Amino acid sequence: MKKKKNIVNPNPLHYQYPYYVKIEDGDKDSISYYMRNGVPICYIHWPHRMLHFYAVFNAQSQKEADSMNRLFNNWDKKEYHDTKVQMENEVSYEKLVEEGFDVLQIGTNPEEIVVYKALIHALNKALDELTEEELRYCKMVADKESEYEVSKEMSIHPTILSARKNAALEELGKKMKDYR
């Protein structure tokens, strides 16, 4: 394995109160910027973390160093979480096929398939956020059931059912506004 040139690997004890700023993989501009400005760069493998480059700074006190390390650690955790969520919500043609999606149902245009899948995913998420009663009203509309029959089933006045149904559909519409 080649040894990296111009990368300082200081002993973490070099500074009395060190704090570390993670440098993204492949971000050569940041590394060269820090190096031009005399900031030491370490290649560190923290427990339960991947091996990364870090810029090392010296704080004025242990309290400040702990605060800065906590801040940058929380940023890394948030970025990791956001990336993980984005990957979980990502829809790809290959993933759709793996899940048994039938291309002939929708058509053969991959963009349409991915958009359709994203729409269905968003609709399911929005429906999960509705109450049981609101879901019943949506099911009534989807199944083209009579409001009068459903009002008898639910033991409420048809006018009240109609108002509640409209409110539930409006709520669902708000949740799906980005997919119109």
Image (cartoon, helix red, strand yellow):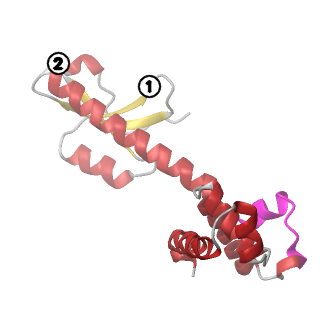
Magenta region:
91-104
Nearest to the observer: residue 165 or residue 171: 165
- Please say whether residue 171 is visible from this viewpoint: yes
- At which x and y percent is residue 52? 44, 36
Q: Decide whether residue 95 is among the magenta residues.
A: yes
Nearest to the observer: residue 142 or residue 46: 142
**SS of the residue at dot 1?**
loop
- As drawn, is 90 to the left or to the right of 145? left
Return the disc, 1 or 2, that comes first in the chain's sequence.
2
- At which x and y percent is residue 89? 61, 57
Classed neighbour count for the residue bearing mark 2: other residues with Cα under 10 Å, few (<14), some (14–19), many (≥20): few
Tell me if label 1 and label 2 are in contact, CB under 8 Å. no
- As drawn, is 107 to the left or to the right of 36? right
- At which x and y percent is residue 169? 59, 73
Classify 125 as above or below 180.
above
Quadrant the N terminus occupies = top right
Classed neighbour count for the residue bearing mark 1: other residues with Cα under 10 Å, few (<14), some (14–19), many (≥20): few
- At which x and y percent is residue 137? 67, 68
Residue 16 tag number = 2
Snapshot quadrant of residue 53: top left
Q: Decide whether residue 44 is among the magenta residues.
A: no
Snapshot quadrant of residue 14: top left
**SS of the residue at dot 2?**
loop
Please give the count of numbered marks on the rendered protein: 2
Disc 2 marks a residue whose amino acid type is Gln
Quadrant the C terminus occupies = bottom right
Rounded to the nearest angstrom, the CA distance separating label 1 from label 2 is 19 Å
Residue 46 tag number = 1
Residue positioned 35% across, 42% down in the render: 75
Residue positioned 14% across, 28% down in the render: 59
- Please say whether residue 3 is visible from this viewpoint: no
Disc 1 marks a residue whose amino acid type is Trp
